[in-house]
Image (cartoon, rainbow, N blue to C red):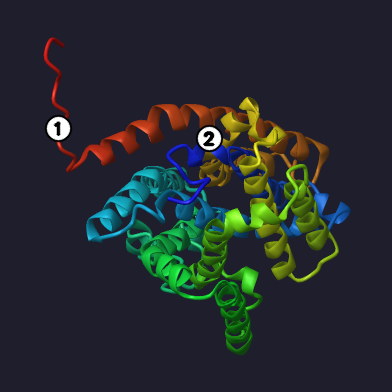
Amino acid sequence: MRPGFGAAAPHRFAALDGYRFVAALCVVVYHYDAEFGIGLARLSPAVGRLNAFVDFFFILSGFVIAVAYRERMTNEADYFRFLKARVARLYPLHLLTLAASVSLLGIAALTGQKPNHPEVLGLQALPANLMLIHAWGLIDHPSFNAVSWSISAEWFCYLLAPLVFLLLRRLPALLNLALPVVFVLAMVAARRTAGLGPWTGAAYDFGAFRALPAFFLGAFIAFQIERIAAAIPPRAFIAPAGFIAALAALHFQANEILAAAAFAVCIAGAAVRALHGGRDPMASAPMQALGDVSYTLYMTHYLLAAPVLFVARRLGWIGTWNGAMAALATLCGAVTLCFFIRRYFEMPAKVAILRVGAPPVKAEAGT
């Protein structure tokens, strides 16, 4: 096994959990700024483009999955254990938010209120959502918990993980680095030809193909991280520089591909610093705790804001100082609630799924 990727490896990249929370927070700010009419996007164009941080998740996912499974996925049984673990991680919260979204239809019918985006709650998209394939180009509009398209896209990448690992093992490093670039350029050309908008606009409409090159890039970083670490001084502050560069690219309205490249630099930099044993504020206990609920926050923030937005619209607060304060209160409440959701729903559900089909644990003698 290569150095740096022993049994303790997942714990050595703790700073990435902190960056994951910051990325989730950026997506929340993007949505809340638009829905509450706060106007932060008028101060910096970056705010109106913070949805690009979804690509940070995809790159990070590829890195983390490759670190954790590249030496452990050697046969069909390993592959299915991997998929089971990913279902246990993703599906409970997806199912909960999907059920909450569907319940909005019943609430709207009982109260006689029309949903703000009725097309999002169309039941024809329910089967695709249940199967986590709603970002594979099968439906032509956002559906239910709209942000869950990225989870569908990640599931697509997980299914292809063995192929990703095979390519990264067999092909030269430069060719592997070129593959995601070529894929993105081809996707940009295809979307432009089809009139579907920019590559980073892909979500429900083929978001899976947006995620795949980013996932591949993250896995590539994992396969090359020791070489990268050998070339970078231990005290280099690569990760924060990459993060700031990504924000700068978004602020100055550069191509989102540059932001994605900066995300990759940030992730590689944080991993390198961990391999060198350097301290990182993103690995502090508070950031670790927040990183633990980053997925929960990402998946629930839109739904948790729905009742607040309903009241805010009735009171005429959208686009006012009161609306901004309501958004801030919603954010604080959402983060707090996420700790409870994770502890009392996500984790028990994950454990229950992992126990399905697992051999029973034998009690030791004398216990």
- Horizontal arrangement in the rendering, residue 24 relative to residue 169 (left or right): right
Residue for point 56% across, 45% down: 298
> Callout 2: helix, strand or loop?
helix
Residue 351's spot in the image, x, y percent?
A: 31, 34
- Horizontal arrangement in the rendering, residue 288 relative to residue 152 (left or right): right
Mark 2–mark 1 Cα distance, whole angstroms, equals 28 Å
- The amino acid on which the numbered mark 1 sits, given as a three-letter code, is Pro
Image quadrant assignment for residue 16: top right
Residue 309's spot in the image, x, y percent?
A: 63, 43
336 or 359: which is nearer to us? 359
Residue 127's spot in the image, x, y percent?
A: 32, 62
User: Dot 2 corresponds to which residue?
Assistant: 292
Say above or below: 251 vs 365. Answer: below
Sequence-earlier tag: 2 or 1: 2
Q: Which of marks 2 and 1 is in front?
A: 1
User: Dot 1 corresponds to which residue?
Assistant: 360
Query: Could you tell me if residue 293 is visible in this image?
Result: no
Q: Residue furthest right?
A: 43
170 or 29: which is nearer to us? 170
Q: Which residue lies furthest to the top in this view?
A: 366
Number of numbered discs visible in the structure rendering: 2
- Horizontal arrangement in the rendering, residue 40 relative to residue 308 (left or right): right
Say above or below: 82 vs 107. Answer: below
